[in-house]
Image (cartoon, rainbow, N blue to C red):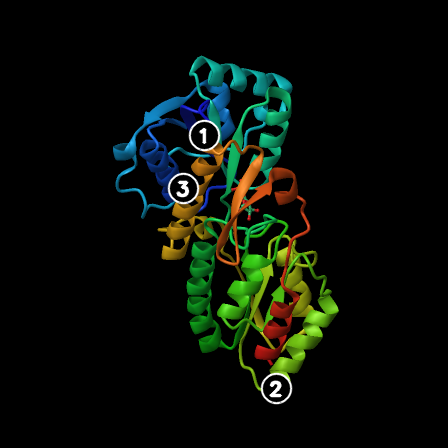
Amino acid sequence: MNPIIKKIAVLTSGGDAPGMNAAIRAVVRTSSYHNLECVGVYRGYEGLIEGDFTPLNARSVKNIINRGGTFLKSARSQRFRTKEGRQQAYENLQKENIDALVAIGGDGTFAGAIVFNEEHDFPIVGMPGTIDNDINGTDFTIGYDTALNTVVEAIDKIRDTANSHNRLFLVEVMGRDAGDIALNAGIGAGAEEILIPEQDMGRDRLVASLKRSKKAGKSSSIVVVAEGDQIGKNILGLADYIRENLQEYEVKVTVLGHIQRGGSPSCYDRVLASRLGVSAVDALLDGKRDIMVGIMHNKIVQVPFAESIKGDNHIDLDLIRVADITSV
Ligand code: F6P
């Protein structure tokens, strides 16, 4: 155990994700278990810069495991990208006698943590919290499972009306740089086609494939489009293109948007957040820093921040095959 750490701060940063409250709760209660002081930071790195802190104890995090969003709030801090902003954040941490930080967020959060540690030699352990599942070194990020369930539920409803009217629906889902939500929710919801940033399908192949499935007897179709997909980026333009080249269908567009980020976390996300929260504090006490705690093959792992944000998203190619085969 590292005797230097007596007081830990916790923050949530970047896009919020269901399960972030469960993650904060686990960090606070693990701190309490080890008799450490714990402080919450509001609005991610913004709150660090402004010194917007609140003391937390085991009771402050009661009744939040089931709540979506993050009670500490979140932000994408531009000021933390500046040296001056980070210096201010460091001074506030010093003023509060905070020895270490748990940062819950995605790649932007971890990129900020790397620079901060380089400049100020400050212990930070990260927890992957984003619906996108686009972090290396962890099979799952907190919030992803809940978002998948939200998307599948929404597409099930769209299917009812698509089928009643023999329509084709383009359904845009989140995933700026990653197709994990589109691919898995697409398979789970039985989509005919799935467009993801990792694979450029091209508009013509899409239309040809939709024509084939129409000929094969399908009366309606669901196409799931990740927001970061090349041809799906302009989803209204894509809908126009399909209308021009596939007159057999009436084409509608639904953008699911931020409903994917809200809602009560699934049991999987609550358990994941709890396991990672305990591991994050344990790692700090073990003298670890500059790492993210993640989950691989259902085992907790520690991954250097630099590895976690490498950006080569690990789409399972076998899933693409499953999607193709099961949508004939
Ligand atoms: O990073 C998670 C995410 O939900 C992305 O899928 C999406 O592109 C982005 O956040 C939206 O961010 P904002 O809420 O800031 O518009």
Q: Earlier in the sequence, mark 2 or mark 3?
A: 2
Ligand number 1: quarter of image: top right
Residue under numbered circle 1 = 43
- Residue 19 % position (x, y): 40, 47
Position of 200 with respect to 325 (left or right) is right
Front residue of 35 and 253: 35
Residue 278: give its label: 3
* Picture layout, residue 310 above or below residue 209: above
CA–CA distance in space, label 1 to label 3: 22 Å
Classed neighbour count for the residue bearing mark 2: other residues with Cα under 10 Å, few (<14), some (14–19), many (≥20):
few
- Residue 133 % position (x, y): 55, 52
Indicate the quadrant where residue 61 lies: top left
- Tell me which amino acid carries mark 3: Val
Front residue of 211 and 135: 135
Q: Secondary structure at mark 3?
A: helix
Q: Secondary structure at mark 1?
A: loop
Q: Earlier in the sequence, mark 2 or mark 1?
A: 1
Residue located at (66% from left, 66% from top): 317
- Tell me which amino acid carries mark 1: Arg
Q: Earlier in the sequence, mark 1 or mark 3?
A: 1
- Tell me which amino acid carries mark 2: Ala
- Residue 26 % position (x, y): 37, 40
Mark 3 close to ligand 1, CB under 8 Å: no
| Between marks 1 and 3 in the image, the one whose residue lies nearer the viewer | 3
Q: Are marks 1 and 3 in contact (CB under 8 Å)?
A: no
Residue under numbered circle 2 = 216
